[in-house]
């Protein structure tokens, strides 16, 4: 196997998208042949000794793993080993370097995909692919057309960044609370809460119900399940069909 960029090697070994693997390199969590790795360097996993957090990365992998998890509030979706709070990865007793795709803020709920398929993770998280993310959002107040229109067109946040257009639908209202369905193609940190705050609709609850073609369905809070082969192929699109055979399935 020829040497390739290190972030690609890490991604293919199941450490997440290439962008997240770049963060591993930049924060000095990666070494190659005993030396700290640098962004832009290349390595051959068949010849070089590549470690993440002091542990060798796997040189050969069996079939990939794909898991849907219904995250509850108070659970982290990141993989920071220095954060003592419970994480999604801690609650799925499956071996392997499973990476959470479609991270959620700690107080948000709903669908997260866990996989060791770095190519799929990259396709689902990179902005240029523009995959839909669907949420049920509870806001305080009864939104008027001006507020809904602003959310749909895009809102300039405090840091000066304008959000992309989104689809926003009123689903249910009771007293001074409203459930919205929001479909968006980006996922900045705390974006939904920041948009709600900016237009005068404080957000009280966020539940993600869909990530691209994968739906939360009847999965209960805190539960997880393996994806079916059909679900994997729908998510992965043009990726090699042989690679998409799941290692496990229920």
Image (cartoon, helix red, strand yellow):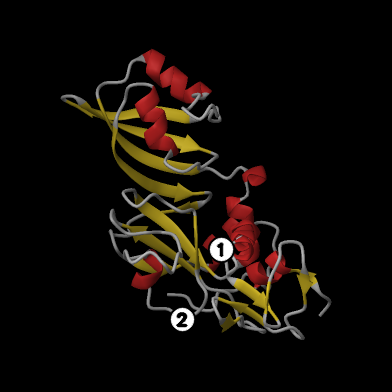
- Which disc number belongs to residue 232? 1
Q: Residue at x 67, y 82 (%)?
A: 34
Q: Is residue 19 left or right of residue 162?
A: right
The residue sitting at the left extreme is 175
Q: Nearer the viewer, residue 136 or 157?
A: 157
Q: Nearer the viewer, residue 175 or 34?
A: 34
Figure quadrant of the N terminus: bottom right
Q: Is residue 32 left or right of residue 227?
A: right
Q: Is residue 248 left or right of residue 123?
A: left
Q: Nearer the viewer, residue 42 or 130?
A: 42
Return the x and y of residue 215 as percentages of the image width and height: 44, 52
Please determine whether, in this image, residue 173 is positioned above or below residue 218. Answer: above
Q: Nearer the viewer, mark 1 or mark 2?
A: 2
Return the x and y of residue 73 as percentages of the image width and height: 28, 53
Q: Residue at x 49, y 78 (%)?
A: 248
Quarter of the figure with residue 146: top left
Return the x and y of residue 129 as percentages of the image width and height: 65, 46
Local packing at callout 2 (Cα closer than 10 Å; few below 14, some 14-19, many 20+) is few
Figure quadrant of the C terminus: bottom left
Q: Is residue 240 visible?
A: no
Task: Name the N-terminal-most of marks 1 and 2.
Answer: 2
**Disc 1 to disc 2, C-alpha distance:** 19 Å
Please determine whether, in this image, residue 140 is positioned above or below residue 43. Answer: above
What residue would you read off at disc 2? 95
Q: Is residue 7 visible?
A: yes
Label 1 element class: helix
Return the x and y of residue 232 as percentages of the image width and height: 56, 63
The residue sitting at the right extreme is 2
Quarter of the figure with residue 201: top left
Q: Residue at x 47, y 37 (%)?
A: 183
């Amino acid at each position: 196997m020829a040497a390739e960029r290190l972030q690609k090697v890490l991604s293919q070994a199941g450490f997440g998208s290439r962008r997240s693997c770049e963060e591993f390199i930049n924060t000095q969590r990666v070494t190659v042949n005993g030396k700290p790795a640098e962004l832009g360097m290349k390595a051959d996993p068949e010849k070089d000794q590549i470690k993440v957090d002091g542990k060798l990365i796997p040189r050969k992998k069996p079939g990939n793993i794909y898991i849907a998890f219904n995250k509850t509030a108070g659970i982290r979706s990141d993989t920071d080993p220095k954060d003592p709070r419970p994480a999604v990865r801690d609650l799925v007793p499956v071996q392997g370097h499973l990476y959470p795709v479609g991270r959620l803020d700690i107080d948000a709920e709903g669908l997260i995909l866990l996989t060791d398929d770095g190519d799929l993770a990259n396709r689902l998280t990179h902005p240029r692919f523009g995959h839909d993310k669907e949420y049920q959002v509870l806001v305080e107040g009864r939104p008027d057309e001006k507020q809904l229109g602003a959310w749909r067109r895009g809102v300039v946040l405090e840091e000066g960044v304008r959000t992309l257009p989104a689809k926003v639908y009123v689903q249910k209202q009771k007293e001074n609370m409203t459930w919205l369905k929001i479909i968006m193609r980006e996922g900045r940190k705390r974006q939904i809460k920041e948009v709600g705050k900016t237009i005068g609709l404080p957000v009280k609850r966020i539940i993600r119900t869909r990530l691209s073609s994968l739906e939360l369905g009847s999965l209960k809070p805190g539960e997880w399940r393996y994806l079916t082969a059909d679900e994997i192929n729908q998510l992965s699109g043009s990726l090699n069909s042989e690679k998409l055979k799941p290692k496990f399935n229920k």
